């Protein structure tokens, strides 16, 4: 029998990538060699998604063209609108996005791998519209005009969700959040997308599968679970008391810990700064007080640190985003990373098909049904 890999394939190298380093000694988190700190300080989500899709930061004219193409891809085909209207009002928006992506695969099939980049751009452009269209139709029966002249994804999304232009602070914070969520090496959803791509399937299938993997609370769903937890407490002392009880019961606290990072998630430092600014701006200082106390208790009791999802929750709350929309926002950004990985997988493909150690029954004689 061959040696078993560690549970959950922890620490196993499952392929090569030129897209991202996660926690590499002396390098940290980079997208195609650019530090996440630099990207979130000086770039935009459009520059970052262009970098991921096309391998280089855009020039002024390349970025302008890219913006124009994304703006031109925001309108939802009528048949997708019909599907969105038919979905139950109580659907989780992650299920809505999964269905929207799959439906686009029927309405606008990739056809050939030569169309992969336009398909990725179309998904980046139209999925925010689809999310907002479904949301408003089912919340208030309104069929919104999903085509805006917003300058970028962050503004487009906030404008559609709230029906008015965002403040500069909200637009910038959302832009940073989209950059932070855009890519993260061989995480569960990206690996899922690569497995699907390795069968030479189409981009919509691979991204639909990625959305399914991202939905769970151990992965993208942690930002919603973190908000639900924070919402249970009215002040920091109550949070500490309850958290200690949770830890005594060996419950997991969502938004803490990471499979790869062992000391710190660099994305958390960045989004925490923005969350604090947003909380100051909107007066939700208790939210930060509770969050910081949870962070202190987790550090003291478990030596665990917040990951990107924990303070993203507070940031989104301040931007007026409903909790079930948190993980969908992650999708809208990660489409960039998933797509880039699909391109990379296709460029040097071999079917991903590992083996398993058999632990079932020994060979047995088959018996006719009346003798079992
Ligand atoms: N809360 C409480 N304990 C945690 C924890 C958390 N968030 N994360 C890890 N631990 C503890 C586990 O209980 C376990 O303790 P034990 O050895 O006493 O049993 C130990 O740390 C190892 O946890 P394990 O789940 O095996 O580690 P992993 O590498 O599989 O975990 C995560 C990675 C992300 C799945 C895990 O940290 C987690 O579940 N976090 C919460 C979900 C989350 O925020 N996901 C988003 C990631 S970006």
Image (cartoon, rainbow, N blue to C red):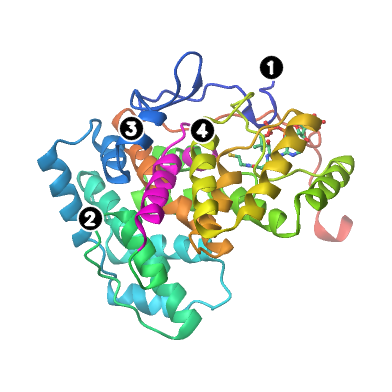
Taking the image as drawn, is residue 202 in sight? Answer: no
Residue marked by disc 1: 3
Taking the image as drawn, is residue 155 in sight? Answer: yes
Give the mark nearest the N terminus, 3 or 4: 3
Front disc: 4 or 2: 2
Give the mark nearest the N terminus, 1 or 2: 1
Q: Is mark 1 on a helix, strand or loop?
A: loop
Which residue appears at 73% of the width and 36% of the height? 296
Front disc: 1 or 3: 3
Mark 2 CB near ligand 1 (8 Å cut): no
Q: In which quarter of the image is the N terminus?
A: top right
- Whether the magenta-drawn stretch holds residue 171 is answered as yes
How far is the residue under mark 1 from the one under mark 4?
17 Å
Residue marked by disc 3: 344
Mark 4 CB near ligand 1 (8 Å cut): no
Residue 344 in picture, x, y percent from top left: 33, 32
Instruction: Classify residue 37 as left or right of residue 90.
Output: left
Circles 4 and 2, Cβ within 8 Å, touching? The answer is no
Residue marked by disc 2: 70
Residue marked by disc 4: 353
Q: What stretch is highlighted in magenta?
A: 166-190
Q: Residues within 10 Å of mark 3 (few under 14, many from 20)?
A: some
Q: Does residue 60 sit above or below 21 in this rendering?
A: below
Q: Does residue 158 sit above or below 25 in this rendering?
A: below
Residue 222 in picture, x, y percent from top left: 62, 48
Q: Which one is nearer the viewer's eye here, 316 or 276?
A: 276
């Amino acid at each position: 029998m061959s040696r078993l890999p560690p549970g959950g394939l922890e620490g196993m190298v499952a392929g090569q990538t030129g897209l991202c380093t996660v926690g590499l000694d002396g390098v940290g988190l980079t997208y195609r060699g650019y530090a996440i700190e630099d990207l979130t300080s000086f770039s935009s989500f459009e520059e970052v998604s262009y970098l991921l899709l096309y391998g280089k930061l855009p020039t002024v004219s390349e970025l302008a063209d890219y913006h124009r193409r994304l703006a031109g891809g925001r309108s939802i085909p009528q048949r997708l609108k019909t599907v969105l209207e038919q979905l139950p009002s109580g659907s989780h928006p992650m299920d809505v996005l999964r269905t929207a992506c799959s439906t686009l695969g029927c309405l606008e099939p990739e056809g050939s791998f030569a169309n992969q980049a336009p398909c990725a751009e179309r998904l980046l452009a139209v999925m925010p519209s689809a999310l907002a269209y479904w949301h408003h139709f089912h919340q208030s029966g309104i069929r919104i005009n999903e085509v805006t002249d917003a300058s970028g994804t962050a503004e487009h999304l906030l404008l559609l969700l709230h029906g008015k232009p965002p403040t500069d602070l909200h637009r910038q914070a959302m832009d940073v959040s989209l950059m932070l969520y855009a890519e993260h090496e061989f995480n569960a959803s990206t690996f899922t997308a690569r497995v699907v791509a390795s069968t030479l399937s189409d981009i919509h299938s691979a991204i639909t599968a990625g959305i399914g993997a991202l939905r769970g609370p151990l992965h993208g769903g942690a930002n919603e679970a973190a908000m639900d937890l924070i919402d249970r407490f009215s002040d920091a002392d109550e949070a500490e008391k309850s958290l200690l009880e949770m830890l005594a019961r060996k419950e997991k606290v969502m938004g803490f810990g990471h499979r790869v990072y062992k000391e710190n998630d660099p994305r958390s430092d960045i989004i925490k700064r923005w969350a604090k600014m947003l909380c100051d701006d909107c007066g939700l200082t208790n939210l930060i007080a509770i969050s910081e106390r949870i962070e202190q208790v987790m550090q003291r009791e478990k030596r665990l640190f917040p990951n990107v999802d924990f303070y993203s929750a507070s940031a989104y709350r301040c931007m007026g985003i409903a909790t079930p929309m948190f993980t969908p926002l992650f999708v809208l950004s990660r489409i960039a990373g998933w797509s880039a990985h699909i391109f990379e997988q296709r460029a040097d493909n071999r079917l991903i098909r590992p083996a398993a150690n058999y632990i079932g029954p020994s060979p047995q004689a088959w018996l006719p049904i009346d003798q079992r």
